[in-house]
Image (cartoon, rainbow, N blue to C red):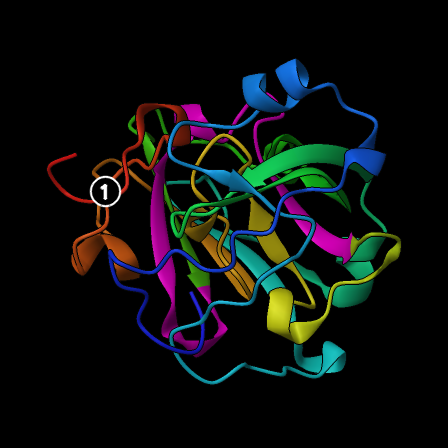
C-alpha cells in the first residue's frame, strides 16, 4: 500500500527494537511472528501517490448488503465512541513493531446501527486513490479491527494513511487499508488490490500467509 510495488524480495531495514522497550527476550520472541524482525520504526510503503483529502470533504460510508447505507462526515466520525489501542503490527515486508499506539473507532461501533443482511460474509475496504482490500466479516468483528485517526497521540499523517485508516492487527499490514473511505458488505469474496497482484487472500502473519500459494 504505498509509493511503489513491494516485491517478494523486499526485506527493509533490519533494525532491532531497543531493549529500553522493557520486554524480555522471551517475550519479544513470543510476540514476533515467524519470518519477521523487530523494528522501532514505522516504515512507509505505498503503491502510488499519497492522497490528501480535505477534512471537510471526507466521509466514511458503509454500503452493500445492509438495510440502509450509513455515512459519517469527519466531525460525525470523531463524535463516535472511540478508544485507545496498543497493538503489535506486522508487515508482509517482514518488519514487526510491538506496542503501536492508536486511537480509533471499532468496526463493531460502526456496524451497531447498520442492519446486516443475513447473506453478509465479507467486507471490502475502499479508499482514496482506488486502493481496496478484502476481509471476511469474521476477521473484523468482536473488536478485531478499528478505523484509526490518531497514532502515538497525534493525528494520523497522510503518509501513514491519514486522516483515517483501517487497522486489523491480526493480519499483515496491507489489510489495514490506508485512506479508508468505505466498507462494502458482500456475500462473496472479492480480491483487493494487492490480493489481485499475488498477495495471499487472507494474510495471517502467524501462518506466514504472505503470497498466493503460501
Magenta-highlighted residues: 127-150
Q: Position of residue 7 (x, y in %)?
A: 26, 63
* Quarter residue 4 falls in: bottom left
Q: Position of residue 65 (x, y in %)?
A: 36, 41
Residue 146 colored in magenta in the image = yes
Outermost residue on the left side: it is: 213
In this orientation, which residue lies closer to the viewer: 193 or 68?
A: 193
Quick check: can you spot residue 112? yes
Q: Vertical placement of 57 versus 29: above or below?
A: below
Label 1 crowd (10 A; few <14 / some 14-19 / many >=20): many
Residue at 64% across, 58% down: 42
Q: Position of residue 36 (x, y in %)?
A: 45, 37
* Quarter residue 172 falls in: top left
Residue at 39% across, 32% down: 205
Q: Position of residue 81 (x, y in %)?
A: 83, 39
Residue at 50% across, 49% down: 176
Q: Which residue is mark 1?
A: 200
Amino acid at each position: 500500500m504505498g509509493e511503489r510495488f513491494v516485491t517478494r524480495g523486499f526485506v527493509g531495514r533490519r533494525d532491532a527494537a531497543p531493549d529500553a522497550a522493557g520486554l524480555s527476550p522471551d517475550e519479544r520472541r513470543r510476540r514476533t511472528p515467524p519470518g519477521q524482525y523487530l523494528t522501532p520504526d514505522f516504515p512507509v510503503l505505498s503503491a502510488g501517490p499519497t492522497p490528501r483529502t480535505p477534512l471537510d470533504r471526507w466521509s466514511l460510508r458503509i454500503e452493500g448488503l445492509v438495510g440502509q447505507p450509513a455515512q459519517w462526515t469527519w466531525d460525525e466520525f470523531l463524535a463516535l465512541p472511540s478508544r485507545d489501542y496498543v497493538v503489535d503490527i506486522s508487515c508482509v515486508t517482514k518488519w514487526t513493531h510491538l506496542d503501536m499506539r492508536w486511537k480509533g473507532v471499532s468496526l463493531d461501533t460502526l456496524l451497531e446501527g447498520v442492519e446486516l443482511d443475513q447473506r453478509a460474509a465479507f467486507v471490502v475496504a475502499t479508499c482514496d486513490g482506488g486502493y481496496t482490500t478484502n476481509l471476511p466479516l469474521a476477521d473484523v468483528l468482536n473488536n478485531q479491527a478499528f478505523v484509526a485517526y490518531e497514532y502515538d497521540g497525534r493525528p494520523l499523517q497522510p503518509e501513514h494513511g491519514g486522516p483515517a485508516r483501517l487497522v486489523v492487527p491480526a493480519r499483515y499490514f496491507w489489510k489495514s487499508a490506508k485512506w479508508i473511505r468505505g466498507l462494502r458488505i458482500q456475500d462473496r469474496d472479492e480480491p483487493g488490490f494487492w490480493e489481485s497482484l499475488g498477495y495471499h487472500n487472507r494474510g495471517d502473519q502467524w501462518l506466514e500467509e504472505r503470497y498466493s500459494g503460501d
